[in-house]
Image (tube, helix red, strand yellow):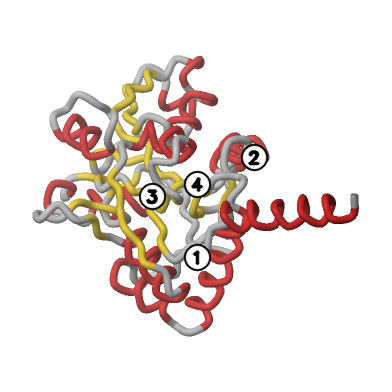
């Protein structure tokens, strides 16, 4: 009996070790269409702030990392389907998403902003937005916010697969404004020639009420499957290390003049 118990224990340990991952190879996913956080280079590779941060984490973890391009609205299902191991695609940490996946500590935080033509009287205020067409990228925090607080109150929320498509329709006059991650709106549109005639209409919003803050989330993190707690632990350790050794700030300065980590 004792031998049998010992044998079963040994087999259990071997089975656990066979299933355990050393995470020397990690597959990251990003969208490749959300500048300056992630975009696609002419040669098809992905680049941007999200990508540089994840690559720095891989170097810190001494892991070999590869990249998968994934459409935004299929990002979490593809993670759960094991198409890749982690998402580095400017995904905000929200309570709804935490029901499905786990997140690393945040690596930046951003408010939402309303982008409209310069001089517009619009503001992120329900009374001023009623009857207006507001473009959002489907499945983003901006979409969730507009759907929850505006759509049933007379605001026409128009959803797109990519934020780049929203800007095209805004420039073509088919939208009154776009509600967007403010850092993306600035770096992906307002600072480019196409955005020369546009600006933020009113103040950017981190959340004015508890309900708004819950929808916007607590910052942006790297998403992993809930069972991959060891990967989350390694990422968090590496993130703390690149913030301490200056690597994080060096990468941030390539894309943003101001601190974007938040409080």
Residue at 29%, 53% in the rendered image? 38
Q: Which residue is mark 1?
A: 261
Q: Secondary structure beneath disc 1? A: loop
Q: Nearer the viewer, mark 4 or mark 1?
A: 4
Residue 92 is marked as 4
Q: Secondary structure beneath disc 3? A: strand
Q: Secondary structure beneath disc 2? A: loop
Of residue 40 and residue 21, the one placed in the foreground of this image is: 21
Q: x%, y% of residue 144? A: 49, 30
Q: Which residue is mark 2?
A: 209
In terms of sequence position, does the residue under pointer 4 or pointer 1 come before the other? 4
- Tell me the CA gap for discs 1 and 3: 16 Å
Q: Nearer the viewer, mark 1 or mark 3?
A: 3
Asked if the residue under mark 3 is in contact with the one under mark 1, i.e. CB atoms within 8 Å, the reply is no
In terms of sequence position, does the residue under pointer 2 or pointer 1 come before the other? 2
Residue at 34%, 46% in the rendered image? 200
- Tell me the CA gap for discs 4 and 3: 9 Å
Q: x%, y% of residue 167? A: 21, 37
Q: Which residue is mark 3?
A: 89
- Tell me the CA gap for discs 4 and 1: 13 Å
Residue at 38%, 32% in the rendered image? 74
Of residue 79 and residue 242, the one placed in the foreground of this image is: 79
């Amino acid at each position: 009996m004792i031998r049998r118990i010992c044998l079963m224990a040994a087999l259990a340990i071997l089975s656990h070790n066979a299933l355990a991952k050393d995470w020397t190879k990690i597959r990251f996913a990003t969208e490749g269409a959300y500048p300056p956080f992630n975009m696609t280079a002419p040669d098809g590779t992905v680049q941007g702030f999200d990508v540089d941060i994840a690559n720095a984490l891989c170097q810190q973890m001494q892991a070999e990392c590869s990249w998968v391009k994934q459409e935004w609205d299929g990002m979490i299902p593809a993670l759960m389907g094991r198409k890749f191991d982690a998402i580095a695609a400017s995904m905000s940490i929200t309570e709804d998403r935490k029901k499905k996946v786990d997140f690393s500590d945040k690596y930046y935080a951003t408010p939402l902003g309303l982008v409209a033509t310069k001089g517009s009287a619009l503001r992120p205020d329900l009374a001023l937005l009623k009857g207006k067409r507001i473009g959002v990228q489907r499945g983003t925090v901006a979409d969730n916010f507009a759907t929850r607080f505006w759509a049933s109150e007379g605001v026409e929320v128009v959803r797109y697969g990519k934020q780049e498509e929203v800007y095209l329709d805004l420039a073509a006059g088919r939208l009154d404004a776009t509600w967007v991650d403010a850092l993306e709106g600035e770096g992906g549109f307002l600072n480019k020639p196409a955005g020369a005639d546009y600006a933020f209409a009113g103040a950017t919003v981190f959340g004015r009420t508890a309900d708004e803050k819950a929808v916007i989330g607590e910052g942006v993190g790297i998403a992993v499957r809930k069972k991959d707690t060891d990967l989350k632990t390694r990422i968090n350790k590496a993130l703390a290390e690149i913030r301490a050794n200056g690597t994080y700030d060096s990468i941030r300065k390539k894309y943003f003049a101001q601190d974007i980590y938040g409080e």
